[in-house]
Image (cartoon, rainbow, N blue to C red):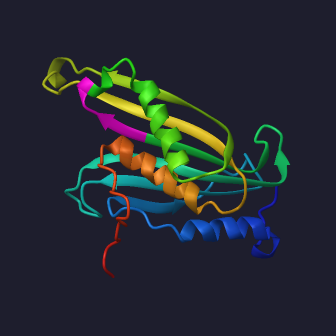
Amino acid sequence: MTPAGPEDVPVEFVSALRSLRQVTVRPEVILDEVPGPARIAPFSAALTAEVRTARRSVAAAELASGRFVVLYDPAGQEAWDGHFRLVTLVRATLEAEVGADPMLAEVAWTWFTDALEESGLDTHAAGGTVTRVLSQSFGALERRSEQTELEIRASWTASDEDLGPHLQAWATLLCTAAGLEPLPDGVVALGPRR
């Protein structure tokens, strides 16, 4: 595989990346561009995110984190049932009582499906896993309280190159996993002043 130059990048992929740049997320969500995976698809892009109690503050606690990957194959891939595949990861630390709930995995998957539905997305071939890890400390660390880590891995196929609503849905999922209250209807999150 040879790296593509700017003139070799399909217009559909460029359009998809531009649609991502138009998305405004809540101020608690910090997005950063990172290299996309090189061997899964001919073209890829990726973002990482952190949900913090305060934007870009050293003292801010991290509530959730994740990764949003865009894969594009102009020829399509049979397993994707399309050309654009979105692959996401969300990680959050939960209170021990919430982590002990036997329905946690089902509830977390509902957070994912609700975020897509609320964004009015036309998606298909969605699938994923929800993993819960309970950590108990012993010995010199036994004063630490029990901790539950939740991980949601999901992927789905977008029907076209307008990926902005998909990124917005993923940001909603991140905020839900972080325990942030949803914004009321009609309220738009404002970014920091420049």
In the rendered image, the residue lying farthest to the left is: 143
Q: How many marks?
A: 0
Asked if residue 96 lies in the magenta stretch, the reply is yes
Relative to 16, say whether 135 is above or below.
Answer: above
Q: Tell me where residue 162 sits by quadrant.
A: bottom right
At 43% across and 51% down in the image, what residue appears? 172
Q: Which percent across, then down, holds residue 186?
A: 38, 64
Out of 133 and 163, give the one closest to the viewer.
163
In the rendered image, the residue lying farthest to the bottom is: 194
Q: Quadrant of the C terminus?
A: bottom left
At 49% across and 32% down in the image, what residue appears? 109
In the rendered image, the residue lying farthest to the front is: 185
Q: Which percent across, then down, holds residue 88?
A: 55, 45
The answer to whether one can see residue 23 in this image is yes
Relative side of 62 to 23, left or right = left
At 43% across and 33% down in the image, what residue appears? 108
Relative side of 124 to 69, left or right = right
Asked if residue 165 lies in the magenta stretch, the reply is no
Out of 64 and 140, give the one closest to the viewer.
64
Q: Which percent across, then down, holds residue 65?
A: 40, 47
Q: Tell me where residue 147 sits by quadrant.
A: top left
At 18% across and 26% down in the image, what residue appears? 145
The answer to whether one can see residue 9 in this image is no
Q: Which percent across, then down, holds residue 118?
A: 50, 49
Relative side of 162 to 175, left or right = right
Q: Quadrant of the N terminus?
A: bottom right
Relative to 101, say whether 88 is above or below.
Answer: below
Q: Which residues are magenta?
A: 91-97
Out of 124 and 155, give the one closest to the viewer.
124
